[in-house]
Image (cartoon, grey):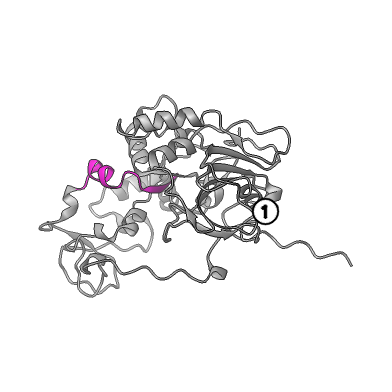
Amino acid sequence: VESFPSSGELWVELLHSGGAAPISRGDEVELHYACLLARSACCMDSSRSKPCSRREPMRVEVGSGRVVEGMDRGLCQLGLGDLARIHVPARLGYGDELAGPIPPGSALVFEVEVVRVNGAACAGLPTPLLRQLLTLPAMPPPLRAITSPLVHAEAARTAAAAAAACAAGPSSWSGWVRRLRGPLRPSEAAHFERFFAARLGSEAALEAAASQADFGASLLPGALPVPRAPHGSAWDGKAPLVLTGPRAGWAPREWGWGWFGERHGDEPVLCKQRAPIFDEDRGDSTLIAECSLREYMRYAEEMETAPEELPLLYMNGWDLFESHPCLWDASIDQIPGSITNLSTAAAPPPLPPLPPRSSTPQFPPPPPPPPPPP
């Protein structure tokens, strides 16, 4: 069963209307987007949570070919302030071409919020409302091609409920988790146990290695133990080192789920079924989802007691720290000559200017048309 059933036609599912006139070809548009696989709801790309990016809206001239044809057409059914899902069949996406992590022949769903058109801007929806609308169940696709958006039947009621519940507590995690379709794979620990047991010859050999005080060198032939030293020790940067001992005045002692939820609960984050450490974890078979930090923490607290079996998803916390250099406390890692600590400066360094429009990273361009017959 697909997360977003596809009819083979392009159609737009309107989740929130900004009340503006439709976009036209040639308009300069800025929008937040997420690209999902229709069959699994796996997030392949997102402007809000893309690692190592400025997490800013994407800029595009509608009709210029900078995005796939289906997205170009879908944008012409939207206006400033609209939030929608653009359902794109494979023939109007990347076709039979492999596009980064997107497999050939994939129907796509673009979650789009239009925040600027030809210089006119809007503030965008608050995160709790945005997340409630984006996780609404998909509507059945239309039976024929249409050229105007379909308004989601639950959008108005959900918006009213979300506005009333903004102060009631964390957002629910059920929508974005339960729409994922994919294999419920073994836990990370079980995966590693099988991996190392296969290399050591048996589970008994793995248990014997793990019973040692420092078993790192026993797990794989040729592996070396990681040395440990008191915090503040000199390090030449040529070998791994584990620092031990107390750290006076260490600010992260105050960190906890309540601390992060209060300050950064609305931050968009990516979570994955597991990191792509092994070859079988690469590609589209490992589930990836976008949510808010508050949603993920609620999921992590409650998933063990959920009545049904759910995928185990890990959140990459590094993205949050990358977005907020102020989280790096000056006393976390002060090893002279080895680690550059972003918090040593009075203020984070300014962001570099945007590259020229012609080189702004966008989705992989659609494949070129085949050459004409001789």
Extent of the magenta region: 255-273
Q: Nearer the viewer, residue 362 or 60?
A: 60
Disc 1 on helix, strand or loop?
helix
Residue 46 magenta: no
Q: Looking at the image, is 349 positioned above or below residue 113?
A: below
Q: Residue at x 33, y 39 (%)?
A: 297
Quadrant showing the N terminus: top right
Left or right of 365 in this view: 202: left
Measured from the top left, where is residue 3 in percent x and y?
A: 57, 36
Q: Looking at the image, is 63 positioned above or below residue 130?
A: below
Instruction: Give the residue pinned by disc 1.
Output: 69
Q: Nearer the viewer, residue 187 or 109?
A: 109
Q: Looking at the image, is 116 positioned above or below residue 186?
A: below
Measured from the top left, where is residue 218 in percent x and y?
A: 33, 56
Measured from the top left, where is residue 41 in percent x and y?
A: 54, 41
Q: Residue at x 35, y 27 (%)?
A: 305
Q: Nearer the viewer, residue 17 or 39?
A: 17
Q: Looking at this rendering, what residue extends furthest in the right direction?
A: 374
The part of the image, by quadrant, that contains residue 171 is top left
Residue 264 magenta: yes
Residue flagged by tag 1: what amino acid is it?
Glu
